[in-house]
Image (tube, grey):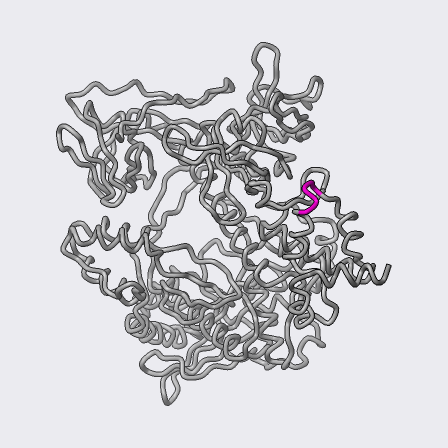
């Protein structure tokens, strides 16, 4: 048997390469693929191990290699877990992405272009399922089409939706519109729910070619219009963890509520330093405190950040739950915290007049706003004041105001912070950071939890002052980790893709403007163009196009810089109470200070992907909630007319943002008139074929609200034309199932 094993291994054409890389070489990937191809049929894992004479001490490493090959799309496992070669079968593995209209797409694992899945194919699966498909040709619109060969993994076992009943048959319509199939409720499994109520459903039978999915109701959440129901739906639709497990709660309850004597060891004592927190009026978790004083060469800036890593250790119950959540989620009037209240609002929060542990970034900044040196160290502190942005802004404007009298002991340091802020702004401009002017809004609620009005949030110097202090500390953290060559998660923001870059350049040439920088423009090139744009009547249009040409920021262990901020290296250090990447950065910095290495239990690249996804998940959930609340609010404005701005142009119509309400709705292409309108993506416009009438991004229009659909959280407008008949207004709001009407697009 030994000779046989030796002969088989020696047939591996890449044996010498494996010997050069590993002390105990495994069969190479190429050899594994060769053997599988020779078999001609899927091979069980156990049989493959026998064929290759994998010994027990090699098994775990070999299985790890197989998993890597599966991840890289070289092999796949069928539902019986047998292994076969992907290329040999001409199959493509990926995830299903559903569309509300019933069709879908296959997003291949290997990054190749998406494939179309017809409504008939989508009957076999649900959104998010992992499948293997075979390409079948082109559909009528020239898109690559595929048929599903096998479902490898079902993504959805539970979902939130509304219960309906027709002709004695009960079914649930998922709140996730990408799941377009109705899920039948098994007889007697309605859980006491009534038609129209929001429920949690457990899927008992997944969909197949010949059968609809079947489930049972496991929880009745309540009626659709109940206060706070929009948040309950969003939590479940986006799989947001919102209840702390027993072990996590127990650890939180056992966490000390005050700093213990032994915690002072190895820490600098900053209790006498007049550090202050500056936050919003409703804030309850205070991550950061700041202090500034003048020194001979410029400024000393001290940024103290809550030392969450002292209380949350790698792998403990608090850490596991924090990793799962990834970040706190801020809904209107409700927060889903990353950490239990005992920590987030208690021992980790830098509350006034109590001792707290912190990690400090102590910076020396020149009179030109350049960071000349910095030092990180653990400390104990005592916040000397809890101040709001409004109070600080008032103090800076009027040194005799009530807030100035209230905080007279720290007023000189606050004024010094403001002087530093003005210096940092000059440095920001020199650096070429992009500074888009966007309007943020805040919803004001009544006693029933519904919107009373929406108001713009005015960013004052206090907001921007704290922002600049946090940017400085984050840059120092990234610099330390990079210089000491310690792996961590950077906050990376890449420049525009070549396609987006060409599109934005083509668009700006029409206006006689040019984006500099050649094939690889820098943030400064964008900033210079932005400066030319400001003050123009079409500034809003041009700024929007610039903003949409940029990519989303993400977390990654490979530092590629932050394009928008103009930094070579940037990370998140300042919010460990509400962001898991910041907690990881704290651990890495502590390791550096102790000349050690911090190695998380999960690979760094996987952590980056996970934290980026949880951030997107939180954004999607909050958008859903805000959309629902805005729809509910607009029901009272059906038939009303408003002035607005075209905020987006698509092939199916114009999105318009209302001036007074800061709410967006759609003017469908079919409502633009009797002409046929052609969509020009590069120019962000719709152009009438016969009349030459043009609608473009940032155009000013007047619209009437004609439809509010609470089911799909969509608001429809028509252009307000006094001489034309306006469609009848409608409010879709009842327990009877409504499917969206399908119309023919006129975008040519």
Give residue 52's quadrant in the image. Answer: bottom right
Residue at position x 47%, y 70% in the image = 474
Towards the viewer: 264 or 500: 500
Give residue 583's quadrant in the image. Answer: bottom right
* Bounds of the magenta segment: 38-42
Quarter of the image that includes the C terminus? top left
Q: Position of residue 241 (x, y in %)?
A: 62, 46
Magenta-colored segment: predominant secondary structure: loop
Report if residue 470 is visible in the image. Answer: yes
Q: Residue furthest bottom?
A: 296
Report if residue 355 is visible in the image. Answer: no
Quarter of the image that includes the N terminus? bottom right
Q: Position of residue 464 (x, y in %)?
A: 36, 64
Q: Residue furthest right?
A: 1
Please give left or right for residue 221 compared with residue 509 in the image: right
Q: Position of residue 362 (x, y in %)?
A: 49, 79
Towards the viewer: 5 or 98: 5
Towards the viewer: 211 or 697: 211
Q: Position of residue 263 (x, y in %)?
A: 68, 75
- 453, above or below 747, in the image: below
Please give left or right for residue 593 compared with residue 539 in the image: right
């Amino acid at each position: 048997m030994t000779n046989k094993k030796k002969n088989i291994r020696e047939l591996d054409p890449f044996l010498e390469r494996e010997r050069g890389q590993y002390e105990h070489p495994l069969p190479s990937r190429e050899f594994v693929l060769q053997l599988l191809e020779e078999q001609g049929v899927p091979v069980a894992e156990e049989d493959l191990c026998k064929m290759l004479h994998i010994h027990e001490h090699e098994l775990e490493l070999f299985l790890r290699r197989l998993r890597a090959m599966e991840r890289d799309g070289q092999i796949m496992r069928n539902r019986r877990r047998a292994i076969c070669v992907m290329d040999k079968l001409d199959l493509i593995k990926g995830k299903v992405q559903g569309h509300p209209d019933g069709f879908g797409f296959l997003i291949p694992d290997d990054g190749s272009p998406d494939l179309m899945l017809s409504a008939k194919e989508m009957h076999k699966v649900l959104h998010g399922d992992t499948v293997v498909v075979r390409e079948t040709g082109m559909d009528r619109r020239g898109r690559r089409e595929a048929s599903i060969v096998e479902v490898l993994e079902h993504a959805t076992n539970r979902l939130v939706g509304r219960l309906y009943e027709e002709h004695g048959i009960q079914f649930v319509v998922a709140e996730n519109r990408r799941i377009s199939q109705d899920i039948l409720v098994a007889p007697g499994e309605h859980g006491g729910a009534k038609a129209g109520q929001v429920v949690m459903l457990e899927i008992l039978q997944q969909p197949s070619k010949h059968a609809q999915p079947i489930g049972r109701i496991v929880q009745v959440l309540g009626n659709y219009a109940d206060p706070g129901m929009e948040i309950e739906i969003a939590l479940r639709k986006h799989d947001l963890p919102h209840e702390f497990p027993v072990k996590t709660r127990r650890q939180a309850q056992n966490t000390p509520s005050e700093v213990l004597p032994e915690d002072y060891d190895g820490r600098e004592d900053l209790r006498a330093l007049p550090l202050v927190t500056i936050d919003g009026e409703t804030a309850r978790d205070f991550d950061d405190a700041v202090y500034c004083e003048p020194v001979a060469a410029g400024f000393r800036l001290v940024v103290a950040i809550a030392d969450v890593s002292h209380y949350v250790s790698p792998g403990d119950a608090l850490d596991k739950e924090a990793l799962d959540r990834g970040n706190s989620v801020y809904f209107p009037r409700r927060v889903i915290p990353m950490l239990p209240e005992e920590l987030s609002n208690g021992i980790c929060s830098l509350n006034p007049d109590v001792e707290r542990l912190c990690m400090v970034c102590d910076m020396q900044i020149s009179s030109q706003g350049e960071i000349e040196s910095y030092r990180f160290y653990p400390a104990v502190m005592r916040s000397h004041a809890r101040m709001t942005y409004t109070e600080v802004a008032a103090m800076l404007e009027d040194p005799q105001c009530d807030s100035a009298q209230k905080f007279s002991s720290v007023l000189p340091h606050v004024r010094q912070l403001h002087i530093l802020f003005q210096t940092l702004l000059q440095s920001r401009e020199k650096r070429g950071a992009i500074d888009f002017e966007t309007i943020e809004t805040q919803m004001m609620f009544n006693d029933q939890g519904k919107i009373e009005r929406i108001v713009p949030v005015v960013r004052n110097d206090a907001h921007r002052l704290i922002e600049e202090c946090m940017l400085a500390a984050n840059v120092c953290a990234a610099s330390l980790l990079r210089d000491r060559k310690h792996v961590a998660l950077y906050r990376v923001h890449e420049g525009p893709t070549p396609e987006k870059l060409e599109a934005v350049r083509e668009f700006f040439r029409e206006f006689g403007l040019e984006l500099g920088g050649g094939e690889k423009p820098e943030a400064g090139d964008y900033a210079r163009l932005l400066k030319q744009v400001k003050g123009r009547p079409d500034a809003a249009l041009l700024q929007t196009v610039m903003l949409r040409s940029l990519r989303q920021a993400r977390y990654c262990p490979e530092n590629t810089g932050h394009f928008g901020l103009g930094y070579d290296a940037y990370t998140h250090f300042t919010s460990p109470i509400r962001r898991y990447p910041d907690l990881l950065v704290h651990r890495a910095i502590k390791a550096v200070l102790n000349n050690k290495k911090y190695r998380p239990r999960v690979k760094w690249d996987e952590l980056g992907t996970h934290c980026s996804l949880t951030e997107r998940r939180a954004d999607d959930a909050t958008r859903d909630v805000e959309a629902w609340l805005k729809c509910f609010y607009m029901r009272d404005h059906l038939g009303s007319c408003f002035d607005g701005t075209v905020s987006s142009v698509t092939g199916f119509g114009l999105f318009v943002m209302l001036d007074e309400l800061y709410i967006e709705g759609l003017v469908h292409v079919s409502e633009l008139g009797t002409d046929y309108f052609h969509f020009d993506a590069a120019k962000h416009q719709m152009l009438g074929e016969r009349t030459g009438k043009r609608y473009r991004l940032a155009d000013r229009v007047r619209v009437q609200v004609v439809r509010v659909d609470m089911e799909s959280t969509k608001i429809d407008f028509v252009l307000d034309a006094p001489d034309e008949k306006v469609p009848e207004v409608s409010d879709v709001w009842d327990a009877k199932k409504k499917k969206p009407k399908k119309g023919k697009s006129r975008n040519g």
